[in-house]
Image: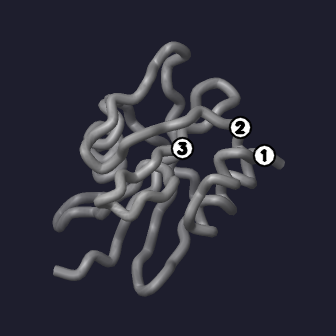
Amino acid sequence: MTRTQEVLIFVRRGDEFLALHRSPENDAYWHSVAGGVEEGETYAAAAVRELREETGLAAEPQPLGSTFDYGGITVECFLVDAPDEWEPELDWEHDDYRWCSAADAADLMHWPEPAAVLRGFAA
């Protein structure tokens, strides 16, 4: 089945946002938590699952009311606030992470759409 729906989750801790570096076998670029919506799954359920799989954080991201399309894929954006002292437990997809201001996180992002959403937090 071709994936046509994805989620993008921005993790915020205080005034900082989490940027994840995808491991070299996954193209080695900076991104936010993201992934596909599985068959029969809602965007919200996919956001919870992807967040836990990629960072270990068990939380319920809130929809931002922001969606975008690229290459026939619809992406719905979410935001979650992490506890003050929380640090991610990276899965195999990622090899590094940084906490950054919204503007700095936007500058790191490989794809323009997540960067544009982050820049909205910096405004």
- Residue drawn at x 69%, y 54% is 107
How far across and how far down the image is residue 103, in percent? 75, 47
The answer to which of 4 and 115 lies nearer the viewer is 115
Mark 1 or mark 2, which has the lower sequence index?
A: 2
Q: Specify whether 105 is left or right of 49.
A: right
Query: Which residue is identified by label 2?
Result: 101
Pick the front one: 90 or 64: 90
Could you tell which of marks 3 and 1 lies nearer the N-terminus?
3
Tag 3: amino acid: Ala
Q: How many marks?
A: 3
Q: Which amino acid does label 2 sit on?
A: Ser
Q: Which residue is drawn at 67% across and 53% down?
A: 106
Q: Quarter-wise, where is residue 57 in the image?
A: top left
Percent across and percent down for residue 79 are: 53, 43
Q: Residue 94 carries which label?
A: none
Element type at mark 3: strand
Q: Distance between the residues labelled 1 and 2?
A: 8 Å
**Residue 41 located left or right of residue 35:** left
Outermost front residue = 24
**Residue type, label 1:** Ala
In the picture of the structure, the residue carrying the numbered disc 3 is: 19
- Nearer to the camera, 111 or 22: 22
Give the crowd class for mark 1: few <14, some 14-19, many >=20 residues within 10 Å.
Answer: some
90 is higher (above) or lower (below) than 3:
above
Dot 3 surroundings within 10 Å: few (below 14), some, or many (20 or more)? many
Asked whether, in this view, residue 41 is left or right of residue 77, the answer is left
State which mark lies toward you, 1 or 2. 2
Q: Which of marks 3 and 2 is nearer the N terminus?
A: 3
Label 1–label 2 contact, CB within 8 A: yes
Q: Give residue 56's quadrant in the image.
A: top left
Q: Mark 1 points at which residue?
A: 122
